[in-house]
């Protein structure tokens, strides 16, 4: 079996996905034509040194040296890795409460990474972006089931309570070394480009880049998914909504990248009404 031609950020994404749901490891290996032993070595290398260790692994081309490195560093793993594993379990708990969240989180992470690829973000930033996309709704674990699973639109009071989930997420994720950028992206992903969003009312490029990316991915996933109180929008209609709100809700430079390069919908088509 030939070794798959995956980028470092793609390897990191697969490792994190496996950490979130270990039962999917065999399926991941089958889908991407990866030997299970090889994938386990990726996991070991990543946990012992992040993407930098994956780089070293690729350059060395020696599994024995990777394994000896893991044995030497296993007792000194950064606390952030343990925290991410705990957060993965929290995500699993949230998924049991709200079946929508699992697919939504996966979609947001995927769309965010696709935008990041077209921006040419480096592998460590892509890793941060993927984690932030996966965890962006983890704060909803602190929102009551009545609000989280309501079949109708939320009242203004309930919406105010729902707006607490970015703050709750940061409390769960923390701000330890290596997680500050994740927390920052998650905390600000409901800011609007014109300053009308929450929780801080930041505007324009005051909003962290990764949060601006998450905002687009989050909104598109939400619009194109069936919810109890409304059906999913067509992809082209959701794309049109993003374009219409570019410069107000969303970054006007990022929206065309997502629509034209990721969704592959020409902007001219969105001016056509069906």
Image: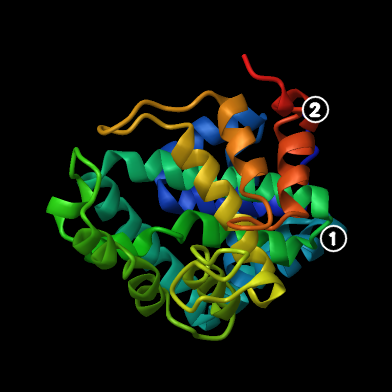
Q: Residue at x 51, y 76 (%)?
A: 201
Point 38% across, 43% down: residue = 102
Q: Which residue is mark 2?
A: 268
Please report contact status of discs 1 and 2: CB closer than 8 Å, yes or no.
no
Expressed as whole percent of the image width and height from the top left, the position of residue 18 reads: 49, 47
Query: 196 or 39, which lies in front?
Result: 196
Q: Earlier in the sequence, mark 1 or mark 2?
A: 1
Q: Position of residue 160 (x, y in %)?
A: 27, 66
Residue at point 58%, 57% (across, down): 249
For mark 1, does the 10 Å Cα neighbourhood hold few (<14), some (14 to 19), or many (20 or more) residues? few
Q: Give the vertical position of 106 relative to 183 (above or below).
A: above
Residue at the outermost left position: 146
Residue ID for mark 1: 60
Instruction: Establish if 67 lies above or below 23.
Output: below
What whole-number distance in Å separates the C-alpha atoms at marks 1 and 2?
A: 48 Å
Label ID, residue 254 = none
Find residue 158 and report its horizontal and vertical position in percent.
Answer: 21, 60
Whether 115 is drawn above or below 190: the answer is: above
Name of the residue lying farthest toward the right: 59
């Amino acid at each position: 079996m030939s070794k798959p031609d995956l980028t470092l950020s793609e390897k990191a994404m697969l490792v994190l996905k496996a950490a979130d749901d270990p039962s999917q490891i065999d399926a991941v290996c089958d889908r991407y034509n990866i030997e299970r032993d090889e994938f386990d070595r990726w996991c070991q290398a990543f946990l012992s040194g992040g993407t930098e260790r994956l780089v070293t692994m690729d350059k060395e081309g020696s599994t024995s040296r990777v394994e000896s490195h893991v044995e030497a560093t296993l007792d000194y793993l950064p606390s952030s890795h343990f925290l991410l594993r705990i957060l993965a379990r929290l995500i699993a708990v949230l998924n049991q409460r709200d079946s929508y969240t699992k697919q939504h989180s996966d979609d947001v992470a995927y769309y965010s990474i696709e935008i990041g690829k077209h921006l040419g973000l480096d592998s460590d930033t892509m890793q941060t972006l993927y984690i932030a996309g996966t965890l962006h709704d983890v704060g909803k674990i602190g929102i009551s089931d009545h609000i989280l699973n309501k079949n109708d639109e939320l009242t203004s009071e309930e919406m105010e309570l729902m707006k607490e989930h970015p703050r709750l997420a940061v409390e769960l994720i923390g701000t330890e070394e290596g997680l500050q950028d994740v927390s920052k992206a998650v905390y600000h992903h409901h800011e609007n480009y014109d300053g009308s969003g929450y929780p801080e009312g930041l505007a324009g490029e005051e909003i962290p880049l990764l949060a601006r990316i998450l905002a687009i991915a989050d909104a598109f996933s939400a619009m194109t998914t069936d919810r109890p109180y409304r059906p999913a929008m067509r992809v082209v209609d959701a794309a049109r909504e993003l374009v219409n709100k570019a410069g107000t809700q969303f970054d006007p430079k990022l929206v065309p990248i997502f629509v034209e390069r990721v969704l592959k919908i020409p902007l001219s088509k969105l001016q056509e009404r069906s």
